[in-house]
Image (cartoon, helix red, strand yellow):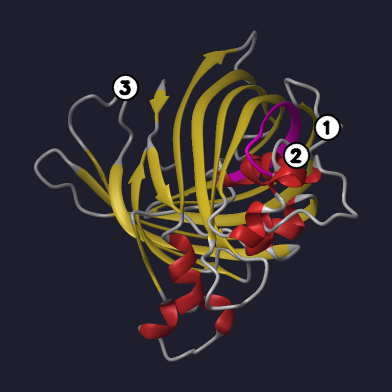
């Protein structure tokens, strides 16, 4: 059955993602870091974003900085991600094999104000960054038993990064000949390959089902500048997601099928994404209400609304989430 999923998200990125390039670093590292982070941010299986952000500490008694703070809420307003994924599945030669195909268009936007120092009389520069990407992927599914299955495949990212930097002070303007065309006011392209392997266990119960998934993804790519003004880089890293989710069926209502959904997952990171996300692991918890409509069931499995909380990363905080085709 075909699935069409649209996610519009507002997110927060660690300041290291948009910091000034150090003179001792290769000038390609900024674009390389951006491409690697975009691979993570555009994968809704490992990070969930919503339409409205909030600080969980304001509504819970925990008062844990890893849940979010006012600074993270301010940063969220400077960054946005939009993704349009589409997937479909075909039967294999036997009932145990299935072929899954994925395509996705994504857009990542983030801006920041930068200063050479903290002098209040100097106007901050405005730094705007955009990443456009297309994704094509394939997975082969093998049903080991009625409950267990293994999935392995390859994803392909085609990415374009563009930076626009406005020098708003004479001090920063003096560095324009050095920074322009290297760290600022430049563009890059990249191809990133992403092999992946996952094991999935689904257990049906009278009240619904619960599912455990462990998925390992590694990515490595090549980035280059069209005008060859600086050395090409290699976006690379890995992430490993372990998660449990459950779906609780509720009473049917006028042809609609309602259910409650909850999930908990841990994501471990390696390589380039660690610097941008400010950690090598984080957790996410989601809780929501889903509704399966009586029409268009070949395209729409369910729609719903809920909350998501990210714990321990630069993306820490809560958000109100709209669900679409949540499995």
Q: Which residues are magenta?
A: 184-202
Residue drawn 75% across the image and 21% down it: 227
Residue drawn 79% across the image and 38% down it: 235
Element type at mark 1: loop
> With 183 as the anchor, is 65 left or right in this view?
left
Element type at mark 2: loop
Q: Earlier in the sequence, mark 2 or mark 3?
A: 2
Q: Residue 193: within the magenta?
A: yes
Estimate the x, y position of residue 161 in percent, counting from the top left. Answer: 62, 33
Label the magenta part by its dominant secondary structure.
strand
Q: Which mark is residue 182?
A: 2
Query: Badges 2 and 1: C-beta atoms under 8 Å apart?
Result: yes
Estimate the x, y position of residue 308 in percent, counting from the top left. Answer: 43, 62
Q: Earlier in the sequence, mark 1 or mark 3?
A: 1
Residue drawn 58% across the image and 58% down it: 13
> With 308 as the anchor, is 161 left or right in this view?
right
Q: Is residue 312 above or below residue 252?
A: below
Residue drawn 83% across the image and 35% down it: 234
Residue under numbered circle 3? 298
> With 175 as the anchor, is 126 left or right in this view?
left
Let me know if residue 284 appears in the view: yes
- Name the image quarter holding residue 238: top right
Dot 1, how many residues are within 10 Å of its Cα: few (below 14), some (14-19), or many (20+)? Answer: some
């Amino acid at each position: 059955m075909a699935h069409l999923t649209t996610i519009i998200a507002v997110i927060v990125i660690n300041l290291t993602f948009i910091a000034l390039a150090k003179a001792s670093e290769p000038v390609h590292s900024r674009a390389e870091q951006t491409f690697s982070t975009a691979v993570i941010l555009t994968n809704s299986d490992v990070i969930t974003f919503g339409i409205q952000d909030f600080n969980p500490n304001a509504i819970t008694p925990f008062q844990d900085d890893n849940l979010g703070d006012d600074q993270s809420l301010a940063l969220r307003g400077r960054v946005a991600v939009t993704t349009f994924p589409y997937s479909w599945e075909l039967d294999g030669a036997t009932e145990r094999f299935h072929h899954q195909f994925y395509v996705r268009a994504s857009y990542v936007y983030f801006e920041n104000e930068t200063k050479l120092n903290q002098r209040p009389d100097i106007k901050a520069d405005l730094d705007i960054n955009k990443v456009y990407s297309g994704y094509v992927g394939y997975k082969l599914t093998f049903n080991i038993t009625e409950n267990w299955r293994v999935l392995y495949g390859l994803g392909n990212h085609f990415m374009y990064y563009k930076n626009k930097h406005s020098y708003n002070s004479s001090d920063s303007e003096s560095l324009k000949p050095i920074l322009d065309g290297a760290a600022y006011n430049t563009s890059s392209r990249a191809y990133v390959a992403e092999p992946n392997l996952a094991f999935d266990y689904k257990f049906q119960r009278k009240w619904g089902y619960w599912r455990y998934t462990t998925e390992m993804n590694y990515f490595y790519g090549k980035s280059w500048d069209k005008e060859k003004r600086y050395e090409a880089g290699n976006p690379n890293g890995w992430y490993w997601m372990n998660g449990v989710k459950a779906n609780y069926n509720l009473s049917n209502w006028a042809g609609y099928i309602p259910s409650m959904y909850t999930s908990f997952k841990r994501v471990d990171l390696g390589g380039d994404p660690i610097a941008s996300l400010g950690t090598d692991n984080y957790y996410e918890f989601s809780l929501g209400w889903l509704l399966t409509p009586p029409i268009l069931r070949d395209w729409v499995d369910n729609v719903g609304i809920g909350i998501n909380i990210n714990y321990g990363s630069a993306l820490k905080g809560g958000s109100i989430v709209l669900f679409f085709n949540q499995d």
